[in-house]
Image: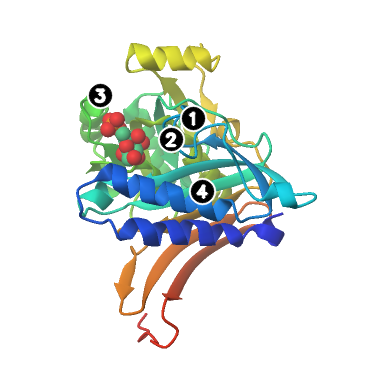
Amino acid sequence: MERQFGLDFIRVTEFAALAAARTMGKGDEELSDRVSTDTIRAELNKLPIRGRVVIGEGDDASKSRLFVGEEVGDWEKIRNAWEVDIAVDPLENNKAVAFGGSSAAVVLAVSERGGILNAPDVYMDKIIVGPTAVGKVDINATPTANVQAIAKAFGRDPDDILIAILDRERNQPLINEVKTAGARIQLIRDGDLTLGIAAAIRGTGMHAVMGIGGAPEGVLAAAALRCLGGEIQAKFMALNPEHEKRLRQWGITDLTRVYKTKDLVSGEQIVFAATAVTRGDLLKGVRFFSGGARTESLFMGYQNRKIRFIDTVHVFEPDVMPVLVR
Ligand code: VTB
């Protein structure tokens, strides 16, 4: 499946990123989100798949598109359409698009049916590391122990490693302890998913992501980490009674359970695609020029062990040829 349709998915995230990038700086998060969501949906509906959204834009069919449970794809006309589960974050870090910040991306993961956990839109306590520190961290250990374990795995002192943490009140105790443990911290306003991916790629300067962030972002990170050989450990968290209700509806009652990478994404045929909308550590954002635009994406297949960085020049007006600079 990866070989047959894999590359089609990159069109989906590229087109959505191009559309969302046009809304940059307009100060309207909902607009940015909607433009991306509508584009993803339209592009997915052209593919020879019978896709079921398992992570999407909430679970209220009346309010949103790409809601959990929605079916997408062009399967009705096609025999033997590929049956897949889809996890999508139409615009990770939509605030960065609306207000001209960095690290916004369109993120999509696909697997065979049942390969991606259908998680409610609540929070998760997470720890994410790349291949260098796989098997060395434990979400139930103290942040100090984890900082020391990560530093040791890299053969460094704690102050030579960098950990990303969402800058939220709820993460303050963690921030204090990581600081005391001696690691450097990148406090992020948003976007623990893209930084989780960066933590699994050497050369980005990021070594781990820790703290409480969105559960859907945790599942999508797991899909990327399966492809990159990294690791996530996560525990569902309810921050208010509404979250408790959702978790109960999903049948999740044991909030002490640690979900590991494969518990979140168990599939064997995983395709992961992310296209940057605004500039980030890993990928350049969308750049427009007269008659075209250029995008950068990360595109991975678990089964065929391919990790591709795709730099695409989109020529909208064939007569205008772009000046190519690397
Ligand atoms: C989290 C995080 C995301 O938004 O969901 C965050 O995982 C929302 O957190 O990466 P708050 O509700 O505390 O604002 C992101 O940062 C961006 O979508």
Give the alpha-carbon distance from disc 3 to disc 2, as whole Å.
28 Å
Query: What kind of residue is marked 1?
Result: Ala
Marks 3,2: beta carbons within 8 A: no
Instruction: Name which of mark 4 and mark 2 comes first in the sequence.
Output: 4
Query: What kind of residue is marked 2?
Result: Ser
Residue occupied by mark 4: 41
Disc 3 residue lies near ligand 1 with CB under 8 A: yes
| Pick the front one: 323 or 154 | 323
Could you say where residue 8 lies in the image, as x and y percent from the top left? 60, 61
Left or right: 8 with respect to 318? Answer: right
- The quadrant in which the C terminus is found is bottom left
Q: Residues within 10 Å of mark 2 (few under 14, many from 20)?
A: some
Q: Is residue 3 visible?
A: yes
Q: Which mark is residue 64?
A: 2
Could you say where residue 300 lies in the image, as x and y percent from the top left? 56, 56
Residue occupied by mark 3: 170
